[in-house]
Image (tube, grey):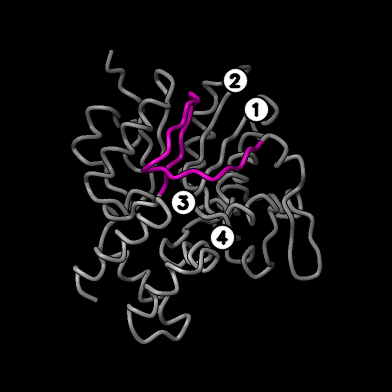
Amino acid sequence: MSDEELTALMQAINNRYGLDFTNYERTSLKRGIIRLMLKHNMESIIELWSLILRDNEFFLESIDDLLVNLTELFRNPDVWIKLRENVLPEFAGKSMKIWHAGCSTGEEVYTMNIVLETLGLLNRTRLTATDLSTKALNKAKKGDYSLVTLKQYLVPFLKFFPHKDMQDFFDFHDKHATIKSKYQTNVTFKKHNLVMDSMMDKFDIIFCRNVMIYFDDTLKHRVLDLLHSCLKDNGYLVIGYYDIMPDYGKSKFGIYDVKTRIYKKISTT
């Protein structure tokens, strides 16, 4: 696939659906397009182009292939331990608002609520969880995961909770398990395009983990401006282990803990 073909396809998608992928990291986009073509046994980019532009449902279903959703229960447990031991105690007795930007299928959101419960903050906190993928959001709202998937999360879970069992947090069925309802009631899931849509709320903590790896510098700057504007003074930003904070962002976010990629808002006023 040539750069010209990729650019033309992204422009056509923008014109047809109002979704601008032109500044996403090109290598990742090419991999996503090739993955999509292989999945549907397509032999040419023209075949994919034609189907995307004439079939709205196909395109909406294809977003998950174009943008890989990376999330796990207790992913990188050191992050959650740092939050439990050092960050969240600052909010003891207070109300909190947290935004999970790019929440994918919801594992991170429910991890956060489990951590909040350990500190007595669950009922004091409202979570907003957003993603571009309707399919991922629908799965996140259900909070239902296969037993095979949960087994993959067992190692990081036990690092955080060495003396707990997943049955403390999930209702288990034959081949799947559902997060207990008390971890769902304080969450609002909604569709949101991080690089195009505004967000009016102010948050104490924002998670944006392994999302910026798909953006070029232009989009990273735009997203960092949005995240900065949505954080309360001294609020925290948590990015992914694969994300790199550009120099532009270092004027807006100071390092709180370099190992776990936790930053703190720098006030510009």
Amino acid on which disc 2 is placed: Ala
Classify mark 3: helix, strand or loop.
Answer: loop
Kindly identify the residue that appears in the image at 22 percent across and 46 percent down. Answer: 217
Spatial separation of the CA atoms under disc 1 and disc 4: 25 Å
Residue behind mark 1 = 121
What numbered label is drawn on residue 10?
none
Spatial separation of the CA atoms under disc 1 and disc 2: 7 Å
Residue behind mark 3 = 76
Q: Is residue 136 magenta?
A: no
Residue most extreme to the top: 269
Q: Is residue 188 magenta?
A: yes
Of mark 1 and mark 4, the one earlier in the sequence is 1
Asked if marks 1 and 2 touch (Cβ < 8 Å), the reply is: yes
Of mark 4 and mark 3, the one earlier in the sequence is 3
Q: Which residues are magenta?
A: 187-209
Amino acid on which disc 1 is placed: Leu
